Amino acid sequence: MSLESNLAAANSCIYFAKNLLKFEPDPWQEDCLEYPGKKLLMNCSRQSGKSSCAAILALHQALYRPNSLILIISPSLRQSSELFRKIIDLLDLMDPRPLLKEENKLSLVTGENSRIISLPASEQTVRGFSSVDLLIYDEAARIPDDMFFSLAPMLAVSQGSTILLSTPWGKTGFFYEVWIDDTNDWKKVSIPASECPRISKETLASEKKLIGEYFFSQEYECQFLSATSSFFDIDRLRGLIEDGDGWQI
């Protein structure tokens, strides 16, 4: 790799993706890869490419920001290891492949002393980390709220970045609350399956028939829905207004 190419990749995550990884991002992925802010939420359909986008951002941080600490948090170890596997697959595409000081199934250490570590959303596994530079919540809608709020202080000193990626999982939890809050400073991206060029109409029709309208709307159309088994309609409950004399609808 030439010095010129390496400098260009260091200064542009899109250049890094296209030229060093041979990855051609969709327009919305380009928008995320070049986003300069520190809070990114991807509410995207299954198989839309949100995991690939997060993996590229994590790898770019690790290779071009020395001494970075990147944590991947998922509901289970299997899920976090899947996103980590995507990062390893991206590394394998690079020619020459960057030399690593350490590499195993769950973590790596780059030659610039940056670390990427994949962990399940468990108090025992995440306690002890500090000064995190990039915190990625994979399947964020399924991670407990207390875990989200307990991890937030890890970014206080480092002023690190946060990425939330998930499909919706009901109208509850921090992923949903961040999504509906119009006053926060998060960049929010929503990509339903119909906007993904790699998912055919035939595939979507088949999936809709297989899993039903409710789960299709959630998994492929990025819609936050009330639980089907709930006695109360959450939309109606949110319509309650307190005026001092009691609750009114």
Image: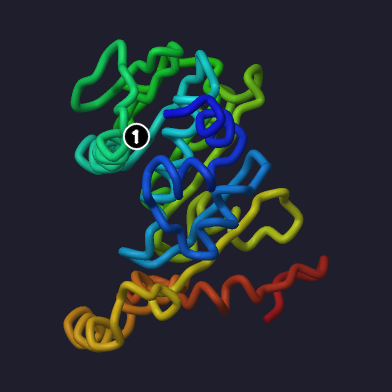
Q: Is residue 9 above or below residue 51?
A: above
Q: Quadrant of residue 155?
A: top right
Left of 178 or right of it: where is 203?
left
What residue appears at the point 59 percent right and 57 percent down from the top-left corner?
31
Which image quadrant: the C terminus? bottom right
Colour scheme shown = rainbow
The residue pinned by badge 1 equals 121
Q: Is residue 204 above or below residue 33?
A: below
Q: Is residue 17 visible?
A: yes
What residue appears at the point 67 percent right and 42 percent down from the top-left corner?
36
Q: Quadrant of residue 109?
A: top left
Q: How many marks?
A: 1
SS at mark 1?
loop
* Residue 136 drawn at (x, y percent): 45, 38
Left of 115 or right of it: where is 89?
left
Q: Is residue 147 visible?
A: no
Left of 247 or right of it: where is 13?
left
* Residue 14 drawn at (x, y percent): 53, 47
Q: Is residue 7 above or below residue 164?
A: above
Left of 27 or right of it: where is 208?
left
What residue appears at the point 56 percent right and 30 percent down from the top-left corner?
4
Amino acid at pointer 1: Ala
Front one among 121 and 229:
121
* Residue 139 drawn at (x, y percent): 37, 50
Front one among 61 and 8:
8
Question: Are there few (<14), some (14-19), or many (20+) residues within 10 Å of tag 1?
Answer: many
* Residue 193 drawn at (x, y percent): 38, 75
Which image quadrant: the N terminus? top left
What residue appears at the point 57 percent right and 29 percent down from the top-left corner?
7
Front one among 186 and 10:
10
